[in-house]
Image (spheres, rainbow, N blue to C red):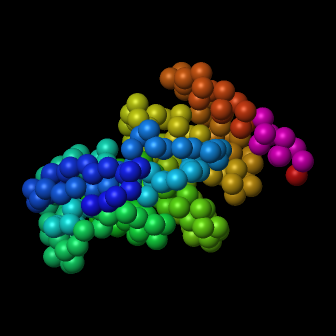
Amino acid sequence: MSKNEDLFEKSFNCPVCGYKFKALKVRSRKIRVTHRDPDGCAHFIGENPYFYNISICPECGYAATEDRFESIGFERKEIITERITPNWQKRDINRERDIEDAINTHKIALHQALITDDTRQYIGLLAMFLAWLYRYIEDTKNERKFLEYALDNFQKSYESEAFTKSFPIERCAFLIGEIFNTFKKYDDAVKWYNIALEHSSLNPGMEKQIRERWQIVSQARRRE
């Protein structure tokens, strides 16, 4: 599928229609991060693994992140079959991707998450990835649009959903604070950093990061 040695083919068995296909992913040893923005957005040399976040079944059109691809219940599967597959133009978009492909595949996954009533956490994370992708190309209008959408969903998730080790409650609160900081709403940012620090499950690295951001934003608030 690709002669790019930084990529490899991963096999998938679609949980919706049973179709077997392969999708490109970036080899972990080839991922080279130059730096990360405060909200976690990584910048890479070479292949960007965010471009390959979403796997899409060429046959039925089902799309999801790799960690969520097989986690689909009966009701959501029915919705994909009834509302996505009939309108899907069969094609393989698991090839090498550029920034436009990455944006398009994330939007496909976000659309499906919305119509299948997936968790606010997952919807918020997809929106966050879209904001980061638009950040790469300095499209500030769309970056802000999807940051606002991520913020709304993370806040609703905090209020009503259970959290997991892969996305703990303090991470959710921290991201809410970071988005408020991006919007220069420093009082709200500090409030959510404090909420994040209240949770006892914080690991030392996460706590250090939040305290550093709290100090920076508190200083910015005083300068206003």
Left or right: 171 with respect to 138? left
Task: Please provide the residue range marked out in magenta.
Answer: 215-223
Prevailing secondary structure class for the magenta stretch in the rendered image:
helix
* Quarter of image, res 177: top right
Left or right: 102 with respect to 190? left
| Count of number-bearing discs | 0
Left or right: 199 with respect to 55? right
Task: Report x, y in % for residue 192.
Answer: 63, 40
Quick one: quadrant of the N terminus? Answer: bottom left
Nearer-the-camera pick, 176 or 212: 212
Left or right: 142 with respect to 93? right
Identify the residue shown where x is 23% and y is 46%.
71
Can I make out residue 2 in this image?
A: yes
Magenta segment includes 221: yes
Seen as rendered, the residue at the extreme left is 18
Identify the residue shown where x is 23% and y is 73%.
91
Identify the residue shown where x is 52% and y is 41%.
172
Identify the residue shown where x is 57% and y is 44%.
33
Magenta segment includes 163: no
Seen as rendered, the residue at the extreme right is 223
Task: Report x, y in % for residue 10.
Answer: 26, 49
Task: Report x, y in % for residue 219.
Answer: 84, 41
Task: Report x, y in % for residue 128.
Answer: 51, 55
* Quarter of image, res 20: bottom left
Can I make out residue 159 in this image?
A: no
